[in-house]
Amino acid sequence: MNHQSPLTHPIAKIENLTISLPTPGGLLTAVKDLSLALGPRETLGIVGESGSGKSMTALALMGLLPPGAIVQADRMRVGGADILSMSDRQLSADIRGAKAAMIFQEPMTTLNPVYSIGRQLTETMTVHGGTHSAARERAIELLNAVGLSNPEDRFNQYPHQFSGGQRQRILIAMALMNSPDLLIADEPTTALDVTIQAQILDLLKDLREKLGIAVILITHDFGVLANHADRVMVMLKGEVVETGQTRNVLRDPQHDYTKRLIGSLPKAHSRPPRPSGKVLIEAMGLSQTYHFRRALFAPTRKIEAVKDVSFKLGEGETLAVVGESGSGKSTLARMVLGLETSTQGRVSLDGKDISSVPEPVRARLIQPIFQDPYGSLNPRMPVNQIIRRPLDIHGIGTKTERIARTREVMEQTGLSPRFFHAFPNQMSGGQRQRVAIARALILQPRIILCDEPTSALDVSIQAQILTLLEGLRDQLNLTLLLITHDLGVVRQMADRVIVMQQGQIVEEGVTADLFAAPTQEYTRTLLASVPTL
């Protein structure tokens, strides 16, 4: 099947690409018979679940496939260069960073933590023959272009001194250092706030028009595709199942898989807000101030991360806390979990001051589910031990009873018994998040604090996890505190919403009312930043 557009001089062109990967069970076909062509100032969106072959296709264009990968193609060209006939050294010298550049999903794992951003930016150009002074000038020019404030002052700072959105802007600047013809953006906004996501995507659109580059945008967010891709390619298990103009595919999807992906997008819930039961969490005038120095002998500075925050959460209710990075959401979560002591104010758990609640009692009352299941699960432990660990720590039941309870909670969270002895690296992102949920539930807590529980997941897997959480909430009468930047998730899950900005609550209310008629400009900006179909 030929999926290419009729372009006279395409920047990127693939004809009949098949990628096979060696596995212990034999060869795995990661991409099968894929063709595409992409012209200047064009954006192609590639969408599909994990394992569909999206990233493999992008890595093939960069010559970055894993060792042992078998590549077969009639043609694969970037900027007129034949990728198939080039050695790794030629690809590094002539293609990677020069004719084609890639922006990866997680900037903190892409940037070197021990080098300043200035060094990393200039190296991108100097390895291709540029002078250091020209590279520095180009780097500062691009940091300005991508909207990083005071680039001259921040040139010698390190990645950990920037926010997630700033790091992603640095990666975009790095990718553009040598004016590539092709820019591949692999989930460039997955972990970003909606306002930062909108800025990054608008920036890519603007740079595409100004510089005439072609963009491949890999994403699982159809809202992003609707607003930023000219054409879309839907992939399933390594094959292209549907392709066409974005507007046509979204309005009239032909393949069942495309229809299912679009149908998986979060929807506003129709149930009325739950009557507020007994107050389980009450925050009263919470404030948190941090003191730090920029250098050893520099004056001490302070950051007010949370300022005078008060709220109540009743039994059986779901309360969402939303806001941009730096708004104080995560600091608030740590104080509610008892992991940080507030500078002022106090937290009450089930009517008792959190400082007077012993850790074992607190753990059986409230449990967290974190954003990245791979980072929160011990890679050396099998699934059954990970889930059972809280029972072991608290000395609950005999070994036989603990194993039985582990199997019970695995069944409750939709985990197949075949994963009982599996390790986290043998599971998909959605399966790992189910393990994290099972571990949180095993002590039968009354409150679950969900910190961005679906932001790293494909849209179809996200729908499964949200449905699971909703079902468990109703079945077990759980109280949920949901911290997220995904307003689609808020509409589906939350009874009430708190909006935070710069450490303060700027608006709160019933979910449906707040979405229908926000009173604050900041809330209106957040809602307007959400990409929609």
Image: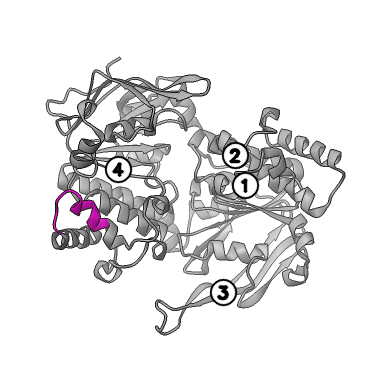
Element at label 4: strand
Which x, y percent locates residue 503? 51, 69
Are dots 2 and 4 in contact, CB under 8 Å?
no
The answer to which of marks 2 and 4 sits earlier in the sequence is 4
Residue 378's mark? 1
| Colour setting | one colour
The mark closer to the camera, 3 or 4, is: 4
Instruction: Report the amino acid beneath label 2.
Output: Pro
Q: Residues within 10 Å of mark 1 (few under 14, many from 20)?
A: some
Element at label 2: helix
Left or right: 315 with respect to 69? right
Are dots 1 and 2 in contact, CB under 8 Å?
yes
The answer to which of marks 1 and 2 sits earlier in the sequence is 1
Are dots 1 and 4 in contact, CB under 8 Å?
no
Q: In terms of depth relative to the viewer, which is nearer, 481 or 436?
A: 436
Q: In terms of depth relative to the viewer, which is nearer, 292 or 488?
A: 292
Q: In terms of depth relative to the viewer, which is nearer, 471 or 411?
A: 411
Instruction: Report the amino acid beneath label 1.
Output: Asn
Residue at label 2? 424
User: Above or below — where is 445 with respect to 339?
Assistant: above
Which x, y percent locates residue 530? 41, 48
